[in-house]
Amino acid sequence: MTTLSFLTVDLPCDMALQAAKKKLSQGGLRALQTFDLHTARHTQQDCPCPNHGTTECDCQMVVLMVYGETAEPATLILHGSEGQTRFSIAEDPSQRADRKLVVSIKEALDIKAAVSA
């Protein structure tokens, strides 16, 4: 599986997540959160950040299954650190996300971008 990063915002991941959920909903899309790195890390004892090597970091990853008109969702990944959040769409060669849904997600996420690809 690969990811295609398409947007970076100057917001911590928790703030970017709330803004994204609101924008997706306003765009007629439904987002179901399936993973939260902070929650997963709290279940582990002594789980330091692989990027920073400390337990006190702001790294976060959230996975959303985004549903539109089609039955199959697209996987939207938010990866945040150091006050920025990157948005990516997961691509699996055996099961590609519906192009129309991906376009709808990108259009809905009208968050001010620091860098967009």
Image (cartoon, helix red, strand yellow):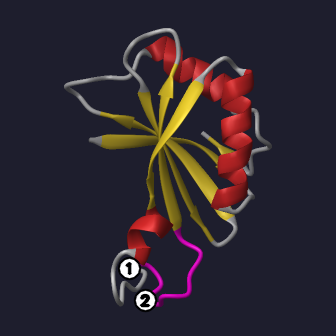
Q: Residue at x 64, y 72 (%)?
A: 82
Q: Which residue is mark 1?
A: 50
Indicate the position of residue 22 as horizontal and vertical percent values: 73, 35
- Indicate yes or no whether the magenta region holds residue 57: yes
> Crowding at label 2, few (<14), some or many (≥20) Cα neighbours within 10 Å?
few
Query: Badges 1 and 2: C-beta atoms under 8 Å apart?
Result: yes
The residue most toward the front is: 43
Q: Residue at x 66, y 29 (%)?
A: 24
Query: Observer-nearest residue: 9 or 19?
Result: 19
Q: Eyeballing the image, is 27 above or below 33?
A: above
Q: Which residue is mark 2?
A: 53
- Indicate yes or no whether the magenta region holds residue 81: no
Q: Eyeballing the image, is 77 above or below 37?
A: above
Indicate the position of residue 60 as horizontal and vertical percent values: 53, 65
The magenta region covers: 50-59
Q: Amino acid at mark 1?
A: Pro
Seen in the image, is 88 located left or right of residue 8? left
> Crowding at label 1, few (<14), some or many (≥20) Cα neighbours within 10 Å?
few
Q: Amino acid at mark 2?
A: Gly
The residue most toward the right is: 112
- When asked about the image quadrant of residue 93, the answer is top left
